[in-house]
Amino acid sequence: MRATLRELGLSLGRMRPGPSNTMLDVPGFRVGHATLVSGHGPLRVGEGPVRTGVTVIMPPGQAPWTGAVHVINGFGKTAGLMQVEELGTVENPIWLTNTLSVGAVLDGYLASVRDAAAGDPGPWRNVVVAECNDGYLNDLWGLHVRARHVQEALSNLTAASLAQGSVGAGTGMAGFGHKGGIGSASRRLSGGHTLSALVLLNCGRPEELLFNGVYVARVDGPPTPDGSIIMVLAGDGGLDAWNLRRVARRATHGLARTGATSAPGSGDVVVAIDVGEERRPSDESLAEWFQAAAETVEEAIWNALLTAETTDGRDGRVLAALDVDKVVAAARRP
Amino acid sequence: MRATLRELGLSLGRMRPGPSNTMLDVPGFRVGHATLVSGHGPLRVGEGPVRTGVTVIMPPGQAPWTGAVHVINGFGKTAGLMQVEELGTVENPIWLTNTLSVGAVLDGYLASVRDAAAGDPGPWRNVVVAECNDGYLNDLWGLHVRARHVQEALSNLTAASLAQGSVGAGTGMAGFGHKGGIGSASRRLSGGHTLSALVLLNCGRPEELLFNGVYVARVDGPPTPDGSIIMVLAGDGGLDAWNLRRVARRATHGLARTGATSAPGSGDVVVAIDVGEERRPSDESLAEWFQAAAETVEEAIWNALLTAETTDGRDGRVLAALDVDKVVAAARRP
Amino acid sequence: MRATLRELGLSLGRMRPGPSNTMLDVPGFRVGHATLVSGHGPLRVGEGPVRTGVTVIMPPGQAPWTGAVHVINGFGKTAGLMQVEELGTVENPIWLTNTLSVGAVLDGYLASVRDAAAGDPGPWRNVVVAECNDGYLNDLWGLHVRARHVQEALSNLTAASLAQGSVGAGTGMAGFGHKGGIGSASRRLSGGHTLSALVLLNCGRPEELLFNGVYVARVDGPPTPDGSIIMVLAGDGGLDAWNLRRVARRATHGLARTGATSAPGSGDVVVAIDVGEERRPSDESLAEWFQAAAETVEEAIWNALLTAETTDGRDGRVLAALDVDKVVAAARRP
Amino acid sequence: MRATLRELGLSLGRMRPGPSNTMLDVPGFRVGHATLVSGHGPLRVGEGPVRTGVTVIMPPGQAPWTGAVHVINGFGKTAGLMQVEELGTVENPIWLTNTLSVGAVLDGYLASVRDAAAGDPGPWRNVVVAECNDGYLNDLWGLHVRARHVQEALSNLTAASLAQGSVGAGTGMAGFGHKGGIGSASRRLSGGHTLSALVLLNCGRPEELLFNGVYVARVDGPPTPDGSIIMVLAGDGGLDAWNLRRVARRATHGLARTGATSAPGSGDVVVAIDVGEERRPSDESLAEWFQAAAETVEEAIWNALLTAETTDGRDGRVLAALDVDKVVAAARRP
């Protein structure tokens, strides 16, 4: 696997990451991927090439958890947001996949819940399934994600390590004209709490990418579509839904610092979960959560870009991995 | 079929309905149902009894159409709302079904779009699938709605007549402790325009139901869950998305006049479509649209209640048709 | 004073009012009015006729209190809403006045806070000042409300009795083509809690007014402007801000049942306060609060209409008191 | 006057500024300040020291103009936002002042409108008055801003040049622990259009300030309160209110790049005005407006910081001007 930002000796922000610098630093969280890769050459709808997948984020313990949503630009097809906004709860694991597989994942997951239940599966039926469009590389209309891939992602749930880059839902995604995908980061807060971000990066234009204030990317070749980005925040601070929503809004600040401007055709969506026991935060404590939201999202985006491998796809298209040297140079300029 | 409000000689509001007093009065709109009814007796998950279905509302001409959303109480699992809110457009027919079949309908519809396309299905990929919970009568966790029922609803699209009551997505729904389901109504506006409502009624408690200010229902027996209501407004006035959203909010006024209070566990959702050529309305014109929204929603709810037939379901449960005499008495009191 | 709805032997809704059936039923709340009436005949800007005033609602104990806002139609100039929406707190008494006196009331109140403080007035600086436009009768541009009227309203604060109708901010207001003004109502809830509404009624068209489903008004003469309505809810249930906001949204249901449709030029605004000790409500408990919100708002509107006296104003204009016999007849029809 | 960012030879972003790189680049816009400075030494409420003021932004031509609002963090007392959100229009010049002078400015401005009118001042009565809290230096509770300062600001309206830094409403404001105040910037877009920002900077913590990804500030001394920032965007692209609101949201991206995280007690508010003739933008065109919103806000914040002069105030407190050399060093590091 390619190196993350910190493995390159670089860093961002003012706060300290957790041990793994991923969402797995929040105790009990598990992540599972199902990665679908097959075929090469011209697009044949229904056949391939296939460059897509599913990622599932499983909070610890029993549903529901405290939840919040923030939509920066709502060009997207994410399901399940309305009830999170009304109730302030997340009732199921969070699913990530491609734009046209939201229905298949939702249907497949409900079937798996039904099959797993000894009797009544209970009342928690709202499921968040978020998506980005991987149709630049993937046979999107082939609808290749099926119920078995939902099962596969569940089977792969682990707290041991978090694969980043071109895996799971990130398999076919782009970012700033390069290969995008899954990225994660975490921050430690006062009181031993942790906030983490896991992003599905598929947004950004090449000319936008900023590292330490320097435009680093500037690739040649045809532009990718506006794309989208899903930002999942997970923490254990015991924030109530009201304040968790305020934290979710600060994901925007992290996204903005990468140079992204949430383009008109980009679905920039934040989903936040808190699994701690509820307590009312002070303003000073909240300020720390805000900073952590901005830092984890910014660093998770960088980790997605830095760990994703060069990937080919339909019609011979290629998304190149970001050139690490450019980032290192930006960090060390002039 | 049981009689609608006006077929009973009653009426509501101050405006004049269109010829059919349904959504079909808006030129070009078509509605299709797929109704699933099978089995009796004890619930066996996956076997039945089945009392559910699918309803599809197809606007005329080419996507996208002007669209708007209003969420009165967001306890629900409707998919596709976020992008309507961001862009002010509806890109596909509106789908109604049960709570756990949103994914199956979404997946099945996308497959049908793919199969129907000569080549690329094009960019309009956001699909609104709205739902109510018919689990009081239906084997909800049986996930009986499949892709073929999506096809069946599409095959049944017609502008000739609109079946109301216990059909399509309304097959297993409740309303104010009675049998609910599909209802519709329309109003004529200045300039020859039409506004119509089609509701999927599954909300309301027995003691709440108001007709002409009289509490008419008061049934015995176990209460049904809080339920939900989906209110689809369709018109041809050429409202822009900004003002169409304001119109959508007035569905609340019609809903409220039936006595409903949008209970904590009720998903009360409005989706509005306008297929006319865009023009900026005057405030006086807008006031007429507001009134029409309130009147059509109120009357559509009554039509759902009045046309729905007594229906049995799982575990011998029965939802009785509303006693028409009670309504007539309420209209003629003291 | 003219009789309220219940003093006429009529009633609305299914719940029981508190002892006074006003906001004063919530322990500790006080209300104060300053009423400005002077002059007759043609409008001379700066001279009169003056038909306006100020009303202040003072919660018990120390700020801040739990607060929530819901905007049904935002054609209005109410100040102070943004921070209530962000923090879920009300920090000062709620002020009602005419459209162009929001600034004068805000400025006058802050001066009074400063003058009353022994030293630093402390941090609670957000003030909600809501308004309706009484320019149909009043010399609105005369800006007659000044700091001394703010002081007068504060001096008149009392929990002993609540004057309704053409008093305070309600002095010059209209409602459904008749004289509007201040109205109030309350409901008792489980556990000994109380919810109350106080409205500043200045909205509604004559042809809209519904009592028990009968259109009762239908007055002749020139129509009044669209107007506005401010609905203040006050309770002691200990609702958190999240759920209090959901309660505030049900004011719409009460408003709708009077026949109002929240016209394009109407500022229909709900502000809710809870002064109880915070506890998490059950859904069943919330449903009761929802019902109470709808009932108190509907009845408060009727009390404003029924208690307001016929009032003349600028240019010989007259707003007639609603004919009580019409309402009684509507209640006893056919 | 101290130098702006570009006068220092530095720059930000990828787009080209207009001739003056201020809001005055949008044809017809004028800005006027009234600056109140008097007294030194200990705070005596009502006497001073006074470090405050008023700034007014006057669009060209006749009201109403297209308007939009975005609230990033709603800890603030800005008046007039609700109606902009409902109607998508701005009806009067935009006013900036201190937190406790919103009422005085609103009242004073309405009086000036009344006095200026030959007869009826007409229907456009909604006034946006935004504020930040300058109480760190200023005798805030002295309520020193009165109607005559409103007149003074109007008298000072000019399109000739825009004073930045410690002037008008910016006189007493802070920013990132340094002296803040008024800043502005502009960008040229395709088709000859212009977007500009004018900010009232009073937010940010010293340790947050980022220039080109380097933390530049790190001052000693007691921290200032969380503060606030008002961001006014003005353009002539003919955006409709729907899309102008989307542009307004991208002010967040510019704010974020300065390192600010919109602290819990910060009122971060965006108001946008478009005075061009309405036309529907393409997505590609919108993307350019988004980028311009981010760039102008970021650069306007820097211009506020760089042009503001060291200012003393109550109780001997001093806010130092930002050390320009630190910024230049950040731009030239390693």
Image: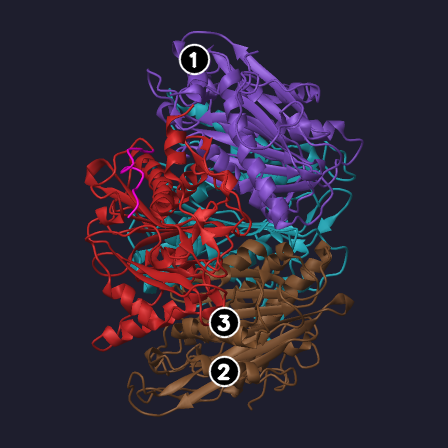
Chain colours: A cyan, B purple, C red, D brown
Report the quarter where the C terminus of chain C lies.
top left
Left or right: C187 as drawn, with respect to B207: left
**Quadrant position of residue A99:** top right
Question: Is residue A46 shown above or below B178?
Answer: below
Most foreground residue, B110 or C10: C10
**Is residue D209 visible to us here?**
no
Residue matched to label 3: D110
Q: Secondary structure at mark 1?
A: loop
**Is residue C222 visible to us here?**
yes
User: Secondary structure of the magenta portion, mostly?
Assistant: loop
Nearer the camera: disc 3 or disc 1? 3
Chain letter of disc 3 in the image: D
Chain letter of disc 2 in the image: D
Most foreground residue, D111 or A19: D111
Residue matched to label 2: D168
Q: Is residue A187 magenta?
A: no
Most foreground residue, C333 or C226: C333
Q: What residue sits 32% from the left and 89% below the top?
A: D316
Amino acid type of the residue that numbered disc 2 sits on in the rendered structure: Gly
Chain letter of disc 1 in the image: B
Amino acid type of the residue that numbered disc 1 sits on in the rendered structure: Ala
| Magenta-drawn segment | C1-12
Q: Secondary structure at mark 3?
A: helix
Number of residues whose C-alpha sits closer than 10 Å to that of mark 3, classed few (under 14), some (14–19) or many (20 or more): many
Residue matched to label 1: B320
Number of residues whose C-alpha sits closer than 10 Å to that of mark 2, classed few (under 14), some (14–19) or many (20 or more): many
